[in-house]
């Protein structure tokens, strides 16, 4: 079946540190991959996406590369800020009887200290 | 352009009571979804709709019903609430096979 596994958190970093949040997936076919971010008290917002192998999604200094050979989509940022503190969800699109749905990982809490 | 809105934001129910959560989107999206979010479990799909008048079950549909009478609205109903339905409920919408846009969530507590 389809599933997404993320590294467990919380991840605690100092401001300007390098961030990596690991994400691996299991899927039939070649799904699109997504990272969503959830700030406290809010809904999920799309952060970036990649639709095929070797694509790199990027937004707001965050990047992730679709690696088919390792079935991974790790999220990286070179220098985190306090404002990046949030919960990050990796997700893949999976085909349903009608249309597609997103299958989410459990989420990784990121805390950035000044 | 409000995006996806949800009503209410918070609700407390007693076991056995019923309620309806309303989701509205103004992006003319065909697809709409209801997810629930529980600690350590990510988001799980309850029901979804691929167009007006069409709904289908997701991963955890038991205890919930939905209706999509208008393209812009997607209602989630709980006929007889149980404590296991305490959760945060998110509505989302999308174009066909596109990224999902989420509402701000409804926090439901069943006592």
Image (cartoon, grey):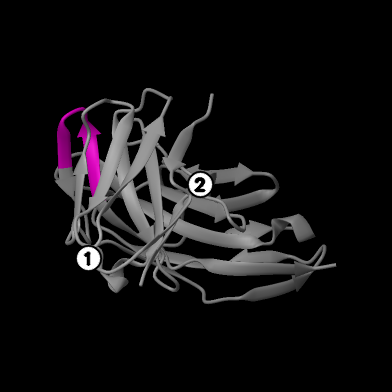
Q: Position of residue B94 (x, y in %)?
A: 37, 35
Q: Position of residue B85 (x, y in %)?
A: 30, 66
Q: Could you say which quadrant of the image residue B26 lies in?
A: top left
- Secondary structure mostly seen in the magenta stretch: strand
The residue that appears at 49% across and 66% down in the rendered structure is: A107
Quarter in which the N terminus of chain B is drawn = top right
Q: Which residue is mark 2?
A: B104
Q: Name the subunit of mark 1.
A: B
Quick check: marks 2 and 1 in contact, CB under 8 Å?
no
B80 displayed left or right of A41: left
Residue B21 visible within the image: yes
Say few, some or many: other residues with alpha carbon within 10 Å of mark 1 (under 14 / 14 to 19 / 20 or more).
few
Dot 1 lies on which element? Answer: loop
Q: Name the subunit of mark 2.
A: B
Give the number of callouts. 2
For residue B16, the mark is 1
Residue B80 sits inside the magenta stretch: no
Residue A74 visible within the image: no
Q: Position of residue A101 (x, y in %)?
A: 29, 47
For residue B103, the mark is none
Q: Could you say which quadrant of the image residue B83 lies in?
A: bottom left
Mark 2 or 1: the one toward you: 1
- Residue stretch rendered in magenta on the structure: B47-55
- Residue B35 vs residue A16, the one in the foreground: B35
Marks 2 and 1, Cα distance to the nearest angstrom?
Answer: 26 Å
The residue that appears at 22% across and 59% down in the rendered structure is: B59
């Amino acid at each position: 079946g389809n599933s997404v596994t993320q590294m467990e958190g919380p991840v605690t970093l100092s401001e300007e540190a390098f961030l990596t949040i690991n994400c691996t997936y299991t899927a039939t076919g070649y799904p699109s991959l997504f990272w969503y971010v959830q700030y406290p008290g809010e809904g999920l917002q799309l952060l970036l996406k990649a639709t095929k192998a070797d694509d790199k999604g990027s937004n707001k200094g965050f990047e992730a590369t679709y690696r088919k050979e390792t079935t991974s989509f790790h999220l990286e940022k070179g220098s985190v800020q306090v404002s990046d503190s949030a919960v990050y969800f990796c997700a893949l699109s999976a085909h349903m009887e009608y249309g597609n749905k997103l299958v989410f990982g459990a989420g990784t809490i990121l805390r950035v200290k000044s | 352009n409000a995006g996806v809105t949800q009503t209410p934001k918070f609700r407390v129910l007693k076991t056995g009571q019923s309620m309806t959560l309303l989701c509205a989107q103004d992006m003319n999206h065909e697809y709409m979804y209801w997810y629930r979010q529980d600690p350590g479990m990510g988001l799980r799909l309850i029901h979804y709709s691929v167009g007006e008048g069409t709904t289908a079950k997701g991963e955890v549909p038991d205890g919930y019903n939905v209706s999509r009478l208008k393209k812009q609205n997607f209602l989630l109903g709980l006929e007889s609430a149980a404590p296991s339905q305490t959760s945060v409920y998110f509505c989302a919408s999308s174009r066909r096979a596109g990224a999902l846009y989420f509402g701000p969530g409804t926090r439901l507590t069943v006592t």
